[in-house]
Amino acid sequence: MQAAVDGAKTQKANGDTIQNDTINIEAGEFTETSLTLQDIDFPLTLEGASGGTTTLDADISVQNVSATLTFLNLVLKGTISVQNSTDVQFQNATVSNALTVQNASVTLDNVSGNATTNTVTVVSDGKDAATNVSNTLTVQNTSDNVTVAVQNSDGNDAHTVVANGATVTVNGSSGDDHVTVQLQGGNTTTNAVTVNSGDGDDALTVEQQGDATSTVNYDGGNQTTGDSLTVTGRNTDAATYTPDANTSGVGTVTAANATVNFANLEPVTVHDVASLTVNGSAGVDAFAVDSPAAGENRIHGTVNGG
């Protein structure tokens, strides 16, 4: 397999063409110690057999790929590392081992995970304090659970999860995690996203971008100064905010078909909506409205006499 990839790179370097920019792999199981796809600047697809099962048992390293790289109809048994790459796609594939993303954009489209756990395991790696990393993981048409572990994050890294017909769990690091969840899909699509941000001063942004019925459960965990939540609508969406009547830092925000349940939070920000309704409790509530900055309104107070 390595020879085929290197041969494709040589052909491109010589100005030759590859048929459909595709390396076709027949059915069967192929074992290699490793497979490296590095410094590729042309679209390339590694495609397994459509009429059988093509299994590749190798640790895969993808580095500095600036064009679309697609793994299609493949069962991938080894670990996978994707670094500094713009568009790496796994389609109709099985990802049996850990997939690490570092400063890269990765799409999982109709992907199965480990056969024992029915889970696709992804590591969103922030690398180190000296490097600002931007990772984007798109999960669509995937019935298996996808678990994302944020590592080595220091507040300057951006971790984005795009859900379009997906069930995703994001587990934060001990540092300051900045996570964005983009909710996509039509009105027959459902998304379920859980974010456990762990320790540190964490920030979650939820962007409602489609008509899917989506639920996001967010636990801010422990913090030094405070964890935050921002919910962004589509300007025409009606939003509601319902604080818990008994527990501070707990509540629910809705925007169109998206419901965000949260716990262990301090500030909650809602913007780009047509209206915002704040629901009080059955007890004694006290709300105040002010404007801390131009174009901003702030609602604060207590519910149920608390």
Image (cartoon, grey):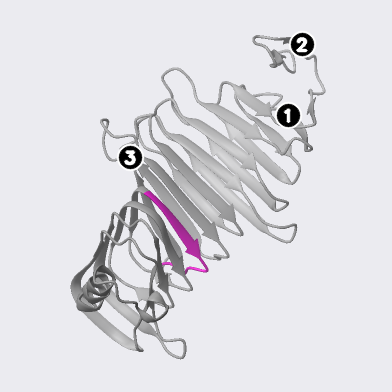
Choose top left, top right, bottom left or bottom right for residue 223. top left
Is residue 257 rendered magenta in the image? no
Q: Which mark is residue 241?
A: 1
Q: Which mark is residue 126?
A: 3
Q: Position of residue 28 (x, y in %)?
A: 32, 88
Report the side of 118 relative to 194 (left or right): left
Q: Position of residue 211 (x, y in %)?
A: 73, 51
Please identify the quadrant where the N terminus is shown: bottom left
Residue range corresponding to the magenta coloring: 104-113
Q: Which mark is residue 286?
A: 2
Say few, some or many: other residues with alpha carbon within 10 Å of mark 3 (under 14 / 14 to 19 / 20 or more): many
Q: Position of residue 216 (x, y in %)?
A: 61, 44
Q: Nearer the viewer, mark 2 or mark 3?
A: 3
Amino acid bearing label 2: Ala
User: Is the magenta region chiefly helix, strand or loop?
Assistant: strand
Looking at the picture, tell me which residue is in the foreground, 19 or 159. Answer: 19
Residue 115 visible in the snapshot: no
Residue 132 visible in the snapshot: yes
